[in-house]
Each structure stands twice: as structure tokens, then as C-alpha cells.
Image (spheres, rainbow, N blue to C red):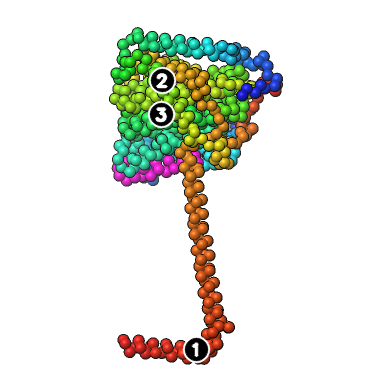
Amino acid sequence: MIDPFPPAFLFFIGAILLLLLPKGSPRALVGIIVPIIAAMMVWDLPTGVGGEVQLAGLTLEMMRVDKLSTIFGLVFCLAAFLGNLYAWHVKDTVQQVAALAYAGSAIGAVFAGDLIILFIYWEGTAIASVFLIWARRTEGAFYTGMRYLIIQIGSGVILLAGVVLLYRETGSIAFEKMELGTLATWLIFLSFGMKCAFPLLHNWLQDSYPAATVTGTVILSAFTTKLAVYALARGFPGTELLIYIGAVMTVFPVFLAEIENDLRRVLAYSLNNQLGFMVVGVGIGTEMSLNGTASHAFAHILYKALLFMSVGAVLFRTGTSKASELGGLYRTMPLTAIFCLVGAASISAFPLFSGFVTKSLILDASAENHYTIVWAMLVFASAGVLSHSGIKIPFFTFFAHDSGKRPAEAPSHMLWAMGITAALCILVGVFPEPLYALLPYEVDYHAYTTYHVVGQLQLLLFALLAFVFLMRTGIHPPEVRAVNLDTDVIYRRFLPMLIIKISNIVSGLWAFGTWFTKGKADRLVRTLHRSHGPEGRMASVWPTGAMVLWIAIILTATLLVNFIT
Amino acid sequence: MAKKPKNDDPQNYPALGRWMMWVDKLGSIKKLTWILGIICALTILANLTYSNKGHYGAENILGFYAFYGFVAFTFIIFVSKALRSIIIRPENYYGKKSIDTEEWPEAELDKKDHTND
């Protein structure tokens, strides 16, 4: 038993403390000091389970510390530090509080000792993070935030349903390795999959991340999806289905990223593709592949944040992140351009950059376990990463044609945040051992063999050569102002259209029905009026004759009935 | 495409940016392409120096990864172009409930550039 102070609470205390301080630097300082202290706490956490709480007859464990939760906890602290440093200029209280509460929830979820605590923090990340989208304060951002919130909360509700069913079946709420098979585990799996942006459940990611504020997207990019990867690695390692889901995830966003105009949405697609590699690692489930997933999540959080930061800096200075409006910015934003190139090289997994030493663990694990087609898909997707994140982002922003824009270099705090992140990307790439030492299992792996380096260089450089060839021949698609359909068109256009159609049909039928019955009733009244009204034929014999006749008929009928019975 | 801004003077750019303007000089792209070509050739040569340790037979073919990279990239571009022709829509397709056509709120930004100072 251990009894540590949960690092998540530090973030919540920070978020409250922030409100008591004057706006400006003191508040920004809280945002960067809290993650540093939290990281030191996480570093010193003793391994074990602890922080018992009694709730409705259940014993909940606030904290479970092992190597898997520690590495995710550490990188989340690092991401919160870098994101808040990047957001030093932000004066908006909503964003500052949301950033801390969001990071705290994610860290709390990573250390959750059971499924109920996981659920509480799971919803915490959803609620805190939506404010980073709403903080843009436009109509579009409001609706986008709503869509995001519905899906995120939905994922939490499905998780809770799964947990309740699991408790009824097994009497346990422990967050341990699960087997797919019962409804309970399938629901939990689905809930993780929604947050992890599985194919067809993915579009909330590309819809919402470009809608958040300049700094909000940097913070969003780190936590939610990697929390889901952690949850999968904890709950479903070795689930073969994940290998195929992951492989599809690495491939399909490549095509959509290639033709997307909003660079922050391109990065969201690329994020989706990187998650695929991690999911494959979880699915293979060997020590090597799980190490690959954890290390790739670590490296990915850094280079993805760096790329979002560099595009964010451009947006901050020019007011747009659309590739069609940008180009040639290296002239006046050279440092941002160089940092972006470092991020691009890292995500593309060039040797000496972070992606190289982490992604190859997953690729080798897939080959070693003879998932040939999956391996081929992953290599293909690696070339795809180069196409959209390695080339498209830096090239169309900072080089390509001259857009005529001459924005000033990013402010110094952004440059510092990007500089530190870039340095970390290179450090991890050149000296992977310290990162390998943090991984959940013993690492016996050397990324820098001649075979690896040459193979990877061939793959990337010849893909680059293909790019040069396609640009020179004019085959490479130009950037145009447009949106591309994704599966979210189903609930953003088709379903509303269907509902409108159905409501039109129903209201049409209703109108016809009322018109028809009213017409019938009118005719009946008119007919009766004609025969029984004051001028009617029946009215002429109305007073006595007709009455006597009818009484006679009724009496006869009664007599007959009596007689027969 | 290039809209030359007014008061555009490279002397106002950061020194690093001025230095990087080498890439836009006439002939620079050609030089860079040649350098890339030479490095590519070197990776193929390097391929000859070791006996392959790949997991699959195909990996032992000389320049397997080079071929795969080139073909994969070209394939991606062609499929993306075809895909775009099917799924492309005007920017205001989702109307007011999306951020696609919205101007960025100025309060979020700090626009500064070198042409108006």
C-alpha cells in the first residue's frame, strides 16, 4: 500500500489558486510551475496501489503507480508545461483554468486504480477540454464544441455502462487486462475506441481540434487521445482486433490529410495516423510492442505539440492556418520554420529524430510476429506521414510560392516553447536510452543499425524524390479553399436532412389528413342540413308524424326482440 | 500568385531569414534536387555494404525501401487527387455551424508584419 498525494489534485489546486491571482504573468506562472512540481512528484512516486476512498459501499483506489502509468504521467506533465509556456500571453481566465483542469484530469485518469475513478477523470477531461474550443467565442466554435462534447460525454456514458455490467458479472471494478467477449467488455472497448479515434469513430478529432484557440489546440493534442491509448494498453493488450484497427487507422487519414487545406486539420489527421501505430503496438501485445506504444506516445506528444505550435504561431501572426493562403513565410519567421522542420523530421521518423527510435519498435514487433500485411501497411503509412506532416506542413507554410505575407517572428515565449520541444525531439532521437529506461519493460533494442538507418533513409528520401518529381510535373494537387467530406457528414448533413425530410412527410400527411376529415365532416353537415334543416324535406313532416312513425318502429323492434328471446 | 507587398524590404527581415533566401535564388532548387538525387544514390550504394537482416525476403532486394517509398508516395498523391474530386465541397458547405469560413477573432491574435512598420 502506498499513500501518495495524487498529482492530479495539484493541478486542480493550481486552477483554483489561479483565480485568486491578478491577471497576466502571475497566472501564467502558475500554469508552468504546477506541471514542474507535478512531474517531480510523479518521478518520486513509489510503485504500488493506494489512496483508498469509500464510496457507496465500494472501495476506490485513487492511485496505481507502475512504469506504464508513470511514463504517461510524466509526458502529460511535460506537455502541460510546454503548452502553458506556449500560452504565456493568454489573458483569458477560462482557457487558463481549463488547461490546468484538463491536464489534471488526464493525469488523474492515468493513475486511476480502478474503473470508477477512471470514469470520473474520463468525463473530467471531456468537460474541461471543451472550454478550450468554446474560448474561441464564435458561433462556429460553439456548435463544434457541442458536437465534441456530445461525443466525449457519450464515450464516458458508454464506459460507465460497461463498468456497471462488468461489476454485475464479476463483482469487481478493477482496471486490469480484459478479454473481449461479454457486452461489458465490448462497451468499455467501444468507449476507449471513441476517445482513441478509431476509424469511423474518428471525425470528432478533425472537426474539433482546428476549432480550438491558437494555444488550446496545442494543449488538446496531447491528452485525450493518448489517455485512450494508455487505457487500451492497460485494458486490452494483445487483443488481435486492435492490430487491424490500428493498421487501418494509419492508412486512411493519409489520403484525407493530403488534400485538406486547413493545416491544423491536416495535423489532426496526422495525429489520427500516429495513433494507429500505437494501437497496433497495443494489439500485438508483446513486451517489445508495448514498449513501442509507450515510447511512441511519448515522442508523439512532443513532436505533435511542436507542429501544432509552429502552425499556431503562424496563425497567431497572420490570422489564418489555411495552406492556400500561406507560403514563403520562412523569410520573416525563420526560427518558427526551423522548429517546424524539426517537428516534421521527427514525425517522419528521420534518423536522429525522435520518431525514428520509437516507431521502429512497433514496426519490428509487427514483422517479428509475422503480421506481414500489417507491416506493409505501416511502412506505407510511414511514407504517408512524410507526405502530409513531413512535407506539406512546412513546405506550403514556409516555402512554396510567396504569399506576400511578411508576418513578424513568433513572440519569444512561443519560440522558447518550440525551442525546448524541438531540442527534446532531437535529444530523444540521438540519445534514446533515457527514454527506453522509462518504458514498462526491459528494452533490448538498437535502433541505430546500418540496416535500419539505410532502409529508413531510402524510404523517406525516395518518397521525397517522388514529391520533387510530382511538383515539377505539376501532378501534385494544389491547395484550394474548400472542405472535404468525412464521415461526420452523416450527422452534420445527411441525418439533419433526413430528419427534415421525415418531418416534411409527416407534416404533409397530417395536413392532408386534417384537410380530408374536415372536408368529409363539412359534407356530412351540409347533407344533414339539407335533409333535416329548416328547409329540408324531413323537416316538413318533423313535428308529429315522423315522431309517431319512429316510436312505432322502435316498439315493433322491441316486441320482436322480446318475442325471439 | 505572388502578390508583392508594399514597402517590402528584405533589410527588415531577421538575418536568418535573409540568409535562408538562398533557396529562392535562381538555380537553387536545381542544386537541391541534385543533392537529393546524389544522397538517394548513396543510400542505394550503402545498401550494398551489408547483408540484409530484414524479416522478409523482399527486404533483401537491393533498394526495396527506395522503391516502396517512391511508389507509395506517388500512389498516395494519385489516390488523394481522385478522392478529392469526389469529396470536395465549397468552404461554406457546413454553414454557420462550422468554423471553416469564419474570420479569426482578433482578440485571439497578435497580427504583426514587416510591411507596415
Classify A17 as above or below A504.
above
Choose between A409 and A227: the one closer to the eye: A409
Counting other residues with Cα less than 10 Å from the Cα at mark 3, is it few (<14), some (14-19), or many (20 or more)?
many
Classify A334 as above or below B83.
above
Q: What is the number of the mark on residue A134?
A: none
Q: Which is in the foreground here, disc 1 or disc 3? A: 1
Q: Which residue is mark 3?
A: A250
Q: Are marks 1 and 3 in contact (CB under 8 Å)?
A: no
Of the image marks 1 and 3, the number of the one nearer the N terminus: 3
Gap between marks 2 and 3 measured at Cα: 16 Å
Q: Which residue is mark 2?
A: B69
Q: Which residue is mark 1?
A: A546
Residue at mark 2 shares a chain with residue at mark 3: no
- Is the N terminus of chain B in the top left, top right, bottom left or bottom right quadrant? top right
Q: Position of residue A251 (x, y in %)?
A: 41, 29
Say which chain tag 1 marks. Answer: A
Q: Which residues are magenta?
A: A147-172
Residue B104 as seen in the image, left or right of residue A50: right
Q: Position of residue A345 (x, y in %)?
A: 47, 19
Gap between marks 2 and 1 measured at Cα: 102 Å
Q: Which residue is located at x 41 percent, y 25 percent?
A: A381
Amino acid under disc 2: Gly
Amino acid under disc 3: Thr
Choose between A369 and A32: the one closer to the eye: A369
